[in-house]
Amino acid sequence: MLISRSRDGQMIAEAVRRFGYGYIVGSTAKGERDRRSAAAAREVVDRLGSGRFVGMTPDGPRGPRQRVSPGVVRLAQMAKVDIVPVAGSISASWRAKSWDRMMVPYPAPCSRGALLFGERIPVPADLSQAGRNDLLRVLEDALNRITAEADELVGAPLIGPAEPAAA
């Protein structure tokens, strides 16, 4: 998993570690001041290039909520891999009052969970900037659709995407 240095990111890193998965600390944010971001991007591309999977929270560490940041598509293009959208939800959880409304599960009897995979999205190696922007919208729509479906399946409240940024 690519996980930000944020407080929420560190909570996610601890959960990922407990499940036995590795993680990379960094961000896909363009212009990130942290030099670790460039190293993290190289590590993501190297892992993907060697046939491993890498999960990313596509709205990045700063949002806006459920709006995919361009770094996801750029990294997939650099690694010459497709993108598979994945979303999950759980009935027994609370939502943080943060910008992203992060879902924090808690143990409860008879709780239900759903993990959904969307259709594979091919990322052409010769994709132009306009093509990357179009692909970004395709990915965002797919993720938001399966996120809403996962929430509906478990009876969790739907938290929709933030309003698009003004152009």
Image: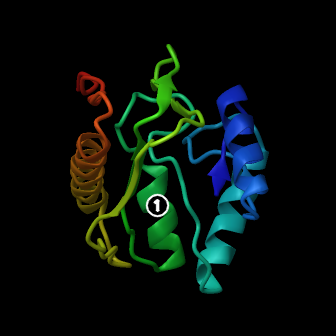
Q: Position of residue 156 (x, y in %)?
A: 32, 33
In the rendered structure, the answer to whether residue 150 lies left or right of residue 96 reads left
Q: Specify the farthest residue to the bottom.
A: 50
Picture layout, residue 105 above or below residue 81: above
Q: Which residue is mark 1?
A: 74
User: Residue shown at 30%/74% (left/top)?
Assistant: 120
* On screen, residue 123 above or below 147: below
Location of residue 35 (image quadrant)? top right
Q: Give me the residue at 65% from left, 66% from top.
A: 44
Indicate the colouring scheme: rainbow
Name the foreground residue: 2 vs 98: 98
Q: With 43 as the anchor, is 103 left or right in this view? A: left
- Crowding around mark 1 (Cα neighbors within 10 Å: few <14, some 14 to 19, many 20+) is many
**Front in this rendered view, residue 121 or 78:** 121
Residue 84 lies, in percent from the top left, at: 38, 68
Q: Secondary structure at mark 1?
A: helix
The residue at 59%/66% (across/down) is 54
